[in-house]
Image (cartoon, rainbow, N blue to C red):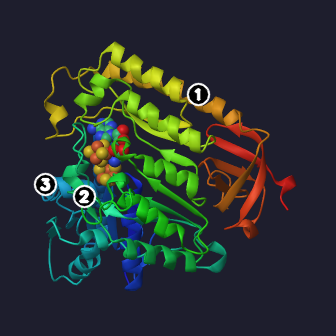
Amino acid sequence: MPSVFIKTYGCQMNERDSEAVAAQLVAKGYSMANDPLKADVVLLNTCSVRDAAEQKAIGKMSHVASQLRSKNKNAVLGFMGCMAQSRGRELIDKLPDVDLVVGTQKFHRAADHIESLLAGRSEIVVDTEEEKGSEATIREHLLEGASDKKSVTSFVSIMQGCNQFCTFCIVPYTRGRERSRSIEDIVSECRDLVERGVKEVTLLGQIVTSYGRREIGDRDGKSAFVQLIEAVHEIDGLERIRFTSPHPKGYGDDLVEAYGRLPKLCESAHIPVQSGSNEMLKRMHRGYTRERFLEIIDKLRAVRPDIGITTDIIVGFPGETEEEFEATMSLCREVEFDNAFVFKYSTRRNTPAAGMDVQLPKELIEERHAKLLAEVDRIGAVRYENQVGETMQILVEGPSRRNKARMEGRTRCNRIVVFDGGERFRGQLVDLKIERAGSFTLYGDPAILN
Ligand code: SAH
Ligand code: SF4
Ligand code: F3S
């Protein structure tokens, strides 16, 4: 049977989509390849959120195409995901060796398309139409097979799309309008995962706080999203629940209150703020103010004082003044994020921000990016340093990514902890004393392991 190489760019939703496509192909008998130049099928699951992400995938494909086509005339070269959706056939015009383009509502069709291309039934497939019900098609998981290599954590896609239309963002155009799966469907997927050994699920969507707004609605003062968390919380054997990304606009008191009430809901929150300036938040069409964001943080810390909070920030949005940038700096100092992902604004075609006056010069964006990043790192280092000496619960996920001889897991507040230990700890909840802190990583003392 043919072998498939898949490389994923972009967010966790893309990771999840790639996993589902891989699982579908493996179920049909395909094997997974580690080297694109030895594969029969090369799929790049692409991201369009910034220009750099698009350029990386295009560069990779043109390299693979130039090497692989001459060796294997029949190989299938495909783009999937957000850039496939936003650029469609244009990608084949640019890279004529590409013969498959699968949009974000068509992942479940990828296996069939590959089959027909390999069999020579079609020469080129471009499938980027909208499809009703596609949000419920990302179900299959490819958990590592052998019993000693079991996946401990898993992503579960709960919705597709976004209706917020932040002025800088391409996601509503690549992922379409918000569509949510049913609570029963999601719970049954989580239950299957737990039966296969998973201990922690992360509920995924671009704007999870909008989950089920239309399809399910509020009940007893609880949003559909909180109802979903409650239902997942009921699953025996599941130890931890996380979600990403919520939007500050939808971060209601019912969700804050859920943190106080539901012990499996981990005390970590990734809440993208983008900017600390009210004027800027308005131009970005974010739908909240700096004061409202700070209020959410205060409320969360009142319920869970040790909550780990991370965020996303954009620097260099059109017209960003020195004062507005300073407002973002001061917000970071005020909140003391565990970490913040700081992005340089990247113009996305057909978004409202692309047409705004005063696009900032590259050098200024670079300068602000470096300045904010240094501040974020400084604040994060202090927060991580403060953990030294504490004993924390870790869910052990597997060998450390940096040093395979050690194991790693995450605290409930989502900090990575590395420790000396063997495979027998995989999937276990262990209490570890934190010995030292490195760059966004903690090191635990195995001595107190029981
Ligand atoms: N749905 C999430 C974010 C998805 S995109 C949310 O709204 O919270 C992930 C991050 O990429 C965003 O939070 C934003 O910080 C960044 N981003 C999005 N569009 C961008 C652009 N045009 N330029 C630079 N960064 C961008
Ligand atoms: Fe993009 Fe805004 Fe939607 Fe997030 S909420 S995906 S930033 S439009
Ligand atoms: Fe990128 Fe699409 Fe995710 S644009 S960030 S892969 S939803």
Q: Check disc 2 and report the residue beneath it.
A: 178
Label 3 or label 2, whichever lies nearer to me, is: 2
**446 relative to 301 in the view: left or right:** right
Q: Residue furthest front?
A: 220
Of callouts 1 and 3, the N-terminal one: 3
Q: Residue furthest top?
A: 322
Local packing at callout 1 (Cα closer than 10 Å; few below 14, some 14-19, many 20+) is many
At x 66%, y 36%, the residue is: 384
- Between 199 and 267, the one lying in front of the other is 267
Q: What x and y, as percent, mark residue 64? A: 33, 59
| Residue identifier under label 1 | 379
**29 shown above or below 58:** below
Foreground disc of the pair 1, 3:
1
- The reply to whether callout 1 and callout 2 are in contact (CB within 8 Å) is no
Is the CB–ligand 3 distance for label 3 below 8 Å?
no
User: Is ligand 1 less than 8 Å from the beta carbon at label 1?
Assistant: no
Q: Nearer the viewer, residue 236 or 302?
A: 302
Query: Which residue is under mark 3?
Result: 90
Q: Earlier in the sequence, mark 3 or mark 2?
A: 3
- State the image coordinates of residue 251 (x, y, percent, origin top left): 40, 46
Percent from the top left, x then y, of residue 333?
Answer: 52, 23
Q: Earlier in the sequence, mark 1 or mark 2?
A: 2
Task: Give the distance between the C-alpha atoms of the residues marked 1 and 2, in whole angstroms.
Answer: 35 Å
Which of the labelled discs sits on residue 21, or is there none? Answer: none
Residue 406, compared with residue 72, is above or below; it is above
At numbered mark 3, what does the secondary structure look like: helix, strand or loop? helix
Q: Amino acid at mark 1?
A: Ile
Q: Is residue 4 visible?
A: no
Q: Is residue 414 above or below residue 395?
A: above
Q: Answer whether labels 1 and 3 touch (C-beta < 8 Å).
A: no
